[in-house]
Image (spheres, helix red, strand yellow):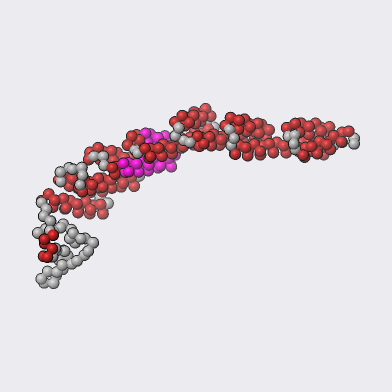
């Protein structure tokens, strides 16, 4: 009788040594005579399949995943090429394990090609979907982290027909966001502003990114332009540009905070000019400057006090 091809019988979790008549340990576990009635007869093909199964386990333990796939294919063919049963499930698992091995070594494209080839050869088992989604996700994330956004888009478009809707939507969102940020970085570095707005318009058209995210990136660019205006043309020009941006893009806390800062700086600038004239006893100039400042900031009490003092000085009272 051949009870098993495994060293420890059909219950490998329990190691029971067997001694022969001379007290020597053979290392095998035998079915006791009283259990012979529970024996199951197997044919020659099943015996071969057990041998192949054990060899597959040994190869995977040694990380020889491709060899395990080869043996799994042999076993599957040997037992009739069915698309159900343990031999088929084992074949799928061995193939997926090899794909995972490729992906873990940074060869996600090879893993995706392998999944496509394997599933078209032995059938589109449900496990291939999870594997394909995972490999595509790893590939896109790796490319995005390296700043290879265009490459990520290309690889995603190639894999998209085989991805689940959930994974496809998630990756499309990540790539679209990276494309928008790349466009922002380009325009911030002196690139064509029209190109930036073209990318933003395309993002709005595609509808993948939330409108709030697109607007957030637009505001970042608006603020940078306004900051440049403040340095080159002063606080008043920056304040006007900020007001225009709020009118065009709608209320935004960052723009509104910037407007408050620019207006406060401009107010301080006007007050200091009028105060300097007053301190130099150029009272008529101080009155003129105070009047001009009050036109822009009619409710400011400091300007009102300064104007009153300048007016009294001019009139001699």
Q: Position of residue 58 (x, y in %)?
A: 22, 54
Lateral position of residue 265 relative to residue 152, left or right? right
Kindly tell me whether residue 224 is visible in this rendering: no
Kindly tell me whether residue 262 is visible in this rendering: yes
Does residue 8 lie above or below 310 as drawn? below
Report the span colored magenta.
129-157
Lateral position of residue 281 relative to residue 231, left or right? right
In the picture as drawn, the residue positioned furthest to the right comes out as 316
- Magenta stretch secondary structure, dominant: helix
- Quadrant containing the C terminus is top right
Kindly identify the residue that appears in the image at 9 percent across and 59 percent down.
1
Lateral position of residue 43 relative to residue 272, left or right? left
Q: Position of residue 288 (x, y in %)?
A: 80, 31
Would residue 93 be counted in the magenta stretch?
Answer: no
Would residue 141 be counted in the magenta stretch?
Answer: yes
Kindly identify the residue that appears in the image at 43 percent across and 42 percent down.
145
Kindly identify the residue that appears in the image at 31 percent across and 46 percent down.
100
The picture quadrant where one finds residue 303 is: top right
Does residue 249 lie above or below 15 as drawn? above
In the picture as drawn, the residue positioned furthest to the front comes out as 37
Q: Position of residue 64 (x, y in %)?
A: 25, 50
Does residue 41 lie above or below 271 as drawn? below
The picture quadrant where one finds residue 83 is: top left
Kindly identify the residue that appears in the image at 28 percent across and 47 percent down.
97
Q: Which of 141 and 211 lies nearest the eye of the viewer?
A: 211
Q: Position of residue 260 (x, y in %)?
A: 66, 38
Q: How many marks?
A: 0
């Amino acid at each position: 009788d051949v009870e098993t091809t495994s060293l420890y019988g059909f219950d490998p979790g329990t190691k029971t040594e067997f001694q022969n008549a001379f007290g020597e340990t053979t290392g095998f576990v035998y079915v006791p005579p009283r259990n012979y009635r529970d024996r199951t007869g197997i044919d020659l093909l099943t015996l071969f399949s057990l041998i192949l199964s054990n060899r597959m386990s040994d190869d995977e333990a040694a990380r020889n995943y491709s060899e395990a796939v080869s043996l799994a294919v042999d076993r599957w063919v040997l037992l009739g090429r069915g698309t159900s049963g343990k031999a088929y499930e084992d074949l799928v698992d061995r193939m997926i394990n090899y794909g995972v091995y490729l992906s873990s070594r940074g060869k996600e494209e090879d893993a995706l090609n392998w999944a496509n080839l394997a599933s078209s050869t032995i059938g589109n088992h449900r496990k291939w979907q999870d594997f394909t989604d995972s490999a595509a996700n790893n590939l896109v994330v790796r490319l995005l982290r390296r700043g290879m956004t265009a490459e990520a888009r290309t690889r995603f478009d190639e894999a998209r027909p085989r991805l689940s809707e959930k994974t496809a939507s998630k990756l499309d969102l990540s790539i679209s966001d990276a494309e928008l940020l790349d466009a922002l970085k380009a325009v911030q570095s002196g690139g064509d502003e029209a190109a930036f707005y073209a990318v933003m318009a395309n993002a709005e058209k595609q509808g993948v990114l939330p409108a709030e995210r697109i607007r957030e990136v637009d505001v970042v660019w608006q603020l940078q332009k306004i900051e440049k205006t403040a340095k080159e043309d002063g606080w008043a020009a920056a304040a006007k540009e900020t007001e225009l941006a709020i009118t065009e893009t709608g209320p935004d806390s960052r723009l509104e905070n910037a407007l408050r800062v620019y207006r406060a700086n401009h107010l301080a600038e006007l007050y200091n000019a009028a105060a300097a004239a007053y301190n130099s006893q150029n009272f008529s100039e101080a009155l003129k400057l105070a009047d001009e400042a009050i036109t822009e900031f009619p409710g400011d009490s400091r300007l009102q006090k300064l104007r009153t003092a300048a007016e009294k000085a001019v009139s001699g009272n």
